[in-house]
Amino acid sequence: MITRDTQYFLLLNVGHFLDHYFMLIFATVAALVLSAGWGMSYAELLLYGAPGFAAFALCSLPMGILADKWGRDRMMVVFFVGIGLASILTGFAQTPLQLGAGLLLVGIFGAIYHPVGLAIVTARWKKAGMRLAVNGIWGNLGVACAALVTGLMIDLAGWRAAFFAPGIVSILFALPYLRVSQSIQSQTTSPADGGAPKKQANYGPRWRVLLCVYMTAVLGSIVFQSTTVALPEIFEERLVGLADQLAATLKSLQMETAAIIGFLAFLVFAIASLAQLVTGYMLDHFGARPTLMLVTGVQVAALLIMPGLTDLAAFAVALGIMLGVFGQVPVNDFLIGSTASDKSRSRAFGARYMVSFLAFSAALPLIAVVQGTWGFDGLFHILMACAAIILVGSRLLLSKPSYDDAGDVVQAQNSEVEARLPR
């Protein structure tokens, strides 16, 4: 029989899946249907989705503050219902302006998940590293499934159904989440992994920890977004020979070069996503400092080697880059969860994700300018510099962790810095 605790974690994972899924429905709908149906270019349509993505970033901190004051489980119920209703309303849009308003609501309610759901995961379970890794993979699945399922929904029932169906599904998850969370709250508040009470990590003065977190959030987000967005085009430029060889080998399958390049990019993303499981294990057993240094070290080495490579060598090194990039994702969340007190946990996550999502927006112009001027080799060098700064910075800013029982005062200066967080 599935325990309440397992149900609770599963529902939190579903929330992460839905959060990323909802944010990408529009991109597929705009590309496949609305651009032709509404007589607008794809670029013109994307402008109406921009406010939603901005709200997804900017509302993270306010949602975290509200969750710390009002209750995280209540906010998760609001998330399931709110983003579902927002998606349904978007499906009724008759004009681009109505569509943009619906997407804005999707972004506002979507901003709830990261500061709230991740705060619950890191507070509830003692071994949070692996939990964060599994939760992150669910988010990645949401990204991967959005285009596929939305495309199927468009073919089967039209573009409006692509907003209606997941909206209804999200609302239906609100009631089981409410029941399970209420049952969990009635149980003991001690960490759910059993054993001794949860230990709170002390990586040094909190101002240094926060500086490391936000430095990593900004630079790591630029590296993540740049590599994930540019990888298909990089493969299109550098893996032509490998793709032609595979096309000749798989001649019976009648696969074109473009399809093979797309498959190779998907393969890299799929394998790299599993790196988060390794990262989660390392976080639970070795802590954030050595784990962050390892994954950024892998990025620096791979990005240093990548310029000039083609075909199989480029594919192998690109896989190394993405292993480091995806492996870094859970580290910041673990670091915040290990050091933030329970009363400020959601707003700490909110500030982190607001910074990260705003940094994402810088990646697209960076790719355009750098690639147009120096090619992808120039982009690799810039991203290597970002990873190197994280590597050196984490070594200087993070001390070897010591541990105190949760609830004890770790250091007076830490409490003073925490008190300055937005309320």
Image (cartoon, rainbow, N blue to C red):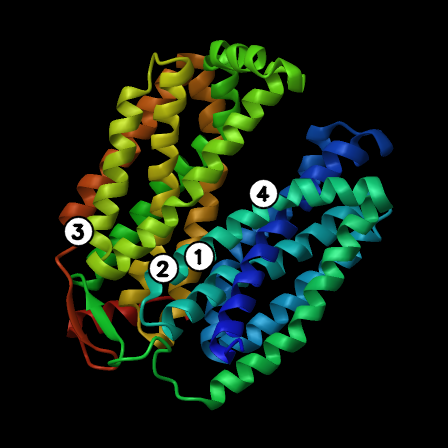
Q: Residues within 10 Å of mark 3 (few under 14, many from 20)?
A: many
Q: Which residue is mark 4?
A: 144
Q: Earlier in the sequence, mark 2 or mark 3?
A: 2
> Are the two marked residues, 1 and 2, in contact with CB atoms closer than 8 angstroms?
yes
Residue 198 position (above or below residue 182): above
Badge 3 amino acid: Leu
The residues bearing labels 4 and 2 have C-alpha atoms spaced at a distance of 21 Å
Q: Position of residue 111 (x, y in %)?
A: 55, 58
Residue 397: mark in rendering:
3
Badge 1 amino acid: Val
Residue shown at the point (66%, 40%) measured from the top left: 147
State the residue lying farthest toward the front.
Answer: 252
The residues bearing labels 1 and 2 have C-alpha atoms spaced at a distance of 6 Å
Left or right: 56 as drawn, with respect to 290: right
Q: Which residue is mark 1?
A: 134
The residues bearing labels 1 and 3 have C-alpha atoms spaced at a distance of 27 Å
Residue 130: mark in rendering:
2
Q: Kindly indicate the quadrant of the structure image that contains residue 83.
A: bottom right
Left or right: 126 as drawn, with respect to 81: left
Q: Residues within 10 Å of mark 1 (few under 14, many from 20)?
A: many
Secondary structure under tag 3 reads helix
Q: Position of residue 133 (x, y in %)?
A: 40, 55
Q: Earlier in the sequence, mark 1 or mark 3?
A: 1
Q: Residues within 10 Å of mark 4 (few under 14, many from 20)?
A: some
